[in-house]
Amino acid sequence: MTTLEQMGIDRMTTGERIALAQEILDSVAAEQPRPPLSAAKRQELDRRRADAEANPADGVPWEQVEAAALARFGR
């Protein structure tokens, strides 16, 4: 008997196995330290944050962005 059979994975649907694999990969990724941002990326984030704070009315809610994308690309 293989390990997969012992764990019952062989009885899972393809979708269930894919979801399990994704959960495992996500858990591994969550444990990895994130590399520090480069000075250029940090500077750009600081610039964007300052712009957002100075111009709060310029922002677009996620729901509006998502709806426009779905309408445009039909998904």
Image (cartoon, rainbow, N blue to C red):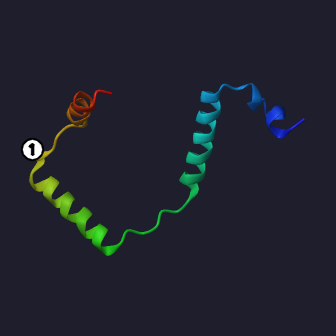
Give the left or right position of residue 70, taking residue 60 as reference: right
Measuring from the top left, give residue 29's x and y in whole percent.
55, 53
- For image coordinates 82% across by 32% down, the residue present is 5
**Front residue (pair 24, 46):** 24
Image quarter of the N terminus: top right
- Give x and y (percent) for residue 58: 10, 46
Quarter holding residue 47: bottom left
Image point 46% across, 67% down: which residue?
Answer: 35
In the rendered image, residue 2, in percent from the top left (x then y), is placed at 86, 38
Secondary structure of residue under mark 1? helix
Residue at (62%, 44%) from the top-left corner? Answer: 24
In the image, residue 42 sits, relative to residue 29, either above or below, namely below
List x then y, in percent, for residue 11.
Answer: 75, 25
Amino acid type, label 1: Ala
Quadrant location of the C terminus in the rendered image: top left
Q: Which residue is mark 1?
A: 57
For the residue pair 53 and 18, the one nearer the viewer reads as 18
Would you identify the image quadrant in which residue 23 lies?
Answer: top right
- Height in image: 22 above or below 72? below
The residue carrying pointer 1 sits among few (fewer than 14), some (14 to 19) or many (20 or more) residues within 10 Å by Cα, namely: few
